[in-house]
Amino acid sequence: MTSTCSYELGSLIDAVKPGPLYRAAIEEVAESICPVIENNKVYQKARVFERLLIPDRVIRFRVEWVNDAGGVEVDFGWRIEHTNVLGPYKGGLRFHPEVTEDTLHFLAYEQCFKNALTGQPIGAGKGGSNFDPKGKSDNEVMRFCQAFMRELHRHIGASVDVPAGDIGVGGREIGYLYGQYMKITKRRDGVMTGKPLGLGGLLGRNEATGYGTVTFAEEMLKHAGDSMDGKRVMISGSGNVALYAAELAMEKGGCVVTMSDSGGSVSFSKGMTSEQLEELIEFKEVERGRLKDFKGKGMSYHPEARPWSLVDADVALPCATQLEVEKDDAGALVDRGVKVVAEGANMPCTHQARAVFHKKGILFGPGKAANAGGVATSCFEMHQNASHSAWTKERTLEKLHGVMVDIHEQCIAQAPMVNGVVDYGVGADRGGFVKLADAIVAMGV
Ligand code: NDP
Ligand code: 2IT
């Protein structure tokens, strides 16, 4: 890929020795932005690409806590503060047994470009732990979160570093984390976003990522002279992003035909009804159940299956995790009739899957653009907290809509056409990069 770039990026990437996920994220961006750097001596002189490869700092710590049986548990904790050139470090925390430093490096890097695209004053970071909340009691989750914050509180601040949720970290976890922060520091300054409403959370933040993804997909459809109305929509995941993507897709006249979790997928022969979605939200958010135990009319459960080959669809929204759409899955999506893919998750489609979409003329909305509504709305929560005010849900959702339309426009402005379709992947990378690069140049060395 970088072999065609006259500005030598390949060896710079090798020097950083990224893990496989971080390497995939870097290489994708490098390919997109190479022409921008080649044509800009100022960026070359300031070495902006290199300066974005190495995070400002990586904080790694031990999290020790006591389980319900009285045993001592020990986990890793991380916070990667990637760049604060555009604003305070900003990005979620992920609690999942497969989390490694490589996972968080890739997520923090993606966050740089995504946050830049939002047009909000936010830098980029990511954190988390290999702790697995699944199967843990509420008290165990609380004790883990308190232990995590015992160290994290030293590093964060409302204008320094503002964490939020991600996989395995929702309102419950943010409540425990922020509660512990308040106890230790006696501050209630909104240092985390995605907070429960009583702790200063924002109406609409819960919905924001999924709603934003659907809004982005709809903008892609509109640009191609179409709409969401009547479309069959395949969704993966059944967590925060997936559930609210389903809600807005249905509100816009779409017919949701699949959902999934790490155990398998469900398909809906005539589309999920709004009653079923309401039950699923309760089942997942409150009862914390598994999809295999979620039963309903017109539903089939497919153990250990991804959704992509199960049913015909027009639109696919991967909203679970990274690398969940591989080359063969992309082929299956094409065979099933999908014309638009928008990533609710971070990097769910592999490079090879993206190549299939490009070759087949499928419209592809990368996560950096399509799921940016979550972090943009987090920034609204920061505004709300800093101004000691209370926003209405309508105000939040209206502003979220504006941000997503604007990101779509930025992508269009920067994107080349490939096989007659807009290359949103390149558009998003270039749009985010130029903002970061200009700020890095302005900052000096
Ligand atoms: P949740 O923890 O709420 O939900 C995650 C969903 O994905 C669950 O259904 C989970 O199933 C499934 N999942 C997780 N890991 C795997 C896996 N290895 N294989 C198959 N399924 C899996 O997380 P979110 O909805 O918040 O996050 C989903 C994605 O969206 C992530 O990529 C995240 O980085 C991204 N994102 C989230 C934002 C947010 O605001 N929350 C903002 C922007 C992006 P199970 O319960 O069985 O594990
Ligand atoms: O990947 C993401 O953008 C998130 N998990 C949300 C980050 C945030 O700070 O709201």
Image (tube, rainbow, N blue to C red):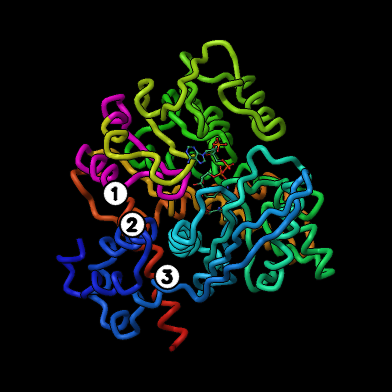
Q: How crowded is mark 1: few (under 14 residues within 10 Å), some or many (20 or more)?
A: some
Q: In which quarter of the image is the N terminus?
A: bottom left
Q: Which residue is disc 1 drawn over?
A: 351
Instruction: Looking at the image, tell me whether mark 3 or mark 2 is earlier in sequence order.
Output: 2
Amino acid beneath label 1: His
Q: Does the magenta stretch include residue 28?
A: no
- Observer able to see residue 117: no
Residue type at mark 3 is Lys
Mark 3 and mark 2: Cα distance apart in space: 22 Å
In the image, 406: left or right of 415? right
Q: Residue 161 carries which label?
A: none
Number of marks in the rendered image: 3
Q: Residue at x 43, y 72 (%)?
A: 436
Between 282 and 412, the one lying in front of the other is 282
* Image: magenta residue range: 332-360
What's the CA distance linking mark 3 and mark 1?
Answer: 24 Å
Q: Nearer the viewer, mark 3 or mark 1?
A: 1
Image location of residue 70, percent across then percent down = 78, 48
User: In the shown orientation, is residue 241 left or right of residue 367?
Assistant: right
Dot placed on the residue nearer the N-terminal end, 1 or 2: 2
Find residue 109 and report its horizontal and vertical position in percent.
Answer: 44, 63
Residue 201 x/y as whole percent: 73, 52
Earlier sequence position, callout 3 versus callout 1: 1
Q: Which residue is drawn at 39% across and 75% down?
A: 437
Mark 2, residue position:
24
Q: Do the residues labelled 1 and 2 touch (CB within 8 Å)?
A: yes
Q: Name the residue under label 3.
A: 435
Is the residue marked 1 within 8 Å of ligand 1, measured from its CB? no
